[in-house]
Image: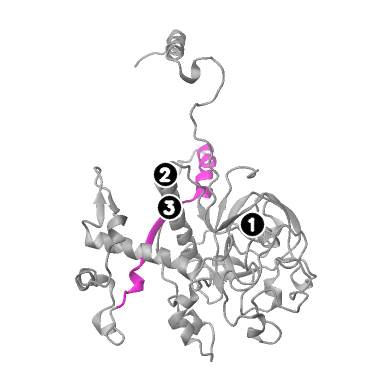
Amino acid sequence: MRKWTMGTIIAGLMLVSSCGGSYMTGELTGVPNRPVPDYYFPWGTVFIPSGVLYKGISDKDVNFSLDKRNRRVSVQAFYMDETEITNNEYRQFVYWVRDSIAAMILGDPYVIEDDEGNVYVNWEAVYELDWSNPEIQEQLSELYVEEEDRFWGKRELDVSKLIYAWMEIDWQKAAANKARIRQGLDPIPRRDLIIKHETPVYPDTLVWVRDFAYSYNEPMTRNYFWHPAFDDYPVVGVTWMQARAFTSWRTRLLNSWLIAIGNQPLDEFRLPTETEWEYAARGGRMHSPYPWGGPYVRNAHGCILANFKPMRGNYPEDGGFYTVRADAYYPNDFGLWNMAGNVAEWTLDAYEESAEWFTHDLNTYMSYRPSEDEHPTRKRKVIRGGSWKDILYYIQTGTRSYEYMDTAKSYIGFRCVSTFLGRTLE
């Protein structure tokens, strides 16, 4: 074993200095030639500056005053989708999964194998794939419903086979490693910090029938996700895990392209925390009950400013019936559309009634990862904003509600955020 001495280290420093580079002056200059941050603006997002949120209910609510206490918290800057994710945007995800699975089944020339044996989709070839070709359909027969299950003999994809494999890191468990070492315990292996998921991606189109008893909504089940008339309407029928799978895919899709063109990757896309969502919904208005201010839901001309359930079930009065286009009505002061009504939106937070009493005032976030066999109450996730079927109370910026993470509804969608890596754009 070689013994290093001070003379050896000094000689090494002299050698490095003689070679030039960043150590030539002997000054502390940092590592040279670091890439300059490129503040790439993700398509369809707006920049939400960091700031302070006076979080909680804006109106008196005696029954829920303990659940939604008011408090002041600080929020880091982030990018947020200006609208809810639409059917056509989510369909891009579904098609990507479909095409990836098809490429792996078809093999060459639809896949590329590198020198290490890793197999990748050859997207240039996949883009030319003719799904209407009977020969291609025959080769992909395992992706279609069986003949006896076909409706009027039509060959259709078996959407239950569209499964997206993705992974995440359990940062909370990783952070606990230091305490384990201090207690004389073995650290958690890195492999145990990586959580792998396989998530079916196709939206549950039957929610339109399932959510409402004695109500004829079958046309929405047949058409809402597929008909071009609804392309720009918010996607519904997605669970909390499906929404998170979408954010994982979107991260890989954008960052692989940014790296390929020599840019720096962005922080990952994800669901907004409950605090980020409320901060963005208020649009910089500290105590207003609605994204446009308040205290009324009609403008000076008597027009309703959001898609919800006015009065006693007069659904069409606000200009909608079910959902409306994701860019309907007017954006708030941050440039965000439909932060009240249309569809309620998944957030990242676990729902805990007393969360405001113990969560931090810095980027407030309630995290909990339930196991499969836990009680359903541990699987509740916060939804915000209210929907087309909700009364006025639920579309207020400070109103909290929840849904179970493994359920899909005809009135819940989502939008994505990405943390801004820096203080401000200015």
Q: Which residue is mark 2?
A: 261
Q: Which mark is residue 276?
A: 1
**Side of 250 where 354 appears, left or right:** right
Between the residue at mark 2 and the residue at mark 3, the CA separation in whole angstroms equals 14 Å
Q: Of circles 2 and 1, which is in front? A: 2
Q: Horizontal and vertical percent for residue 266? A: 51, 47
The numbered mark, 2 or 3, whose residue comes first in the sequence reads 3
**157 inside magenta stretch:** yes
Q: Residue furthest top?
A: 7
Give the residues drawn in magenta, as a range. 156-182
Name the quarter where the N terminus is drawn: top left
The numbered mark, 2 or 1, whose residue comes first in the sequence reads 2
Q: SS at mark 2?
A: loop
**Residue 62 in view (yes/no):** yes
Q: Horizontal and vertical percent for residue 154? A: 29, 82
Name the quarter where the C terminus is drawn: top right
**Side of 168 where 66 appears, left or right:** right
The numbered mark, 3 or 1, whose residue comes first in the sequence reads 3
Label 2 neighbour load within 10 Å: few <14, some 14-19, many 20+:
few
Q: Please tell me which residue is depicted at 74% across the width and 76% down the height of the picture.
A: 298
Q: Of circles 2 and 3, which is in front? A: 2
Label 3 neighbour load within 10 Å: few <14, some 14-19, many 20+:
some
Q: Horizontal and vertical percent for residue 404? A: 54, 70
Q: Which residue is mark 3?
A: 252
Between the residue at mark 3 and the residue at mark 1, the CA separation in whole angstroms equals 23 Å
**28 inside magenta stretch:** no
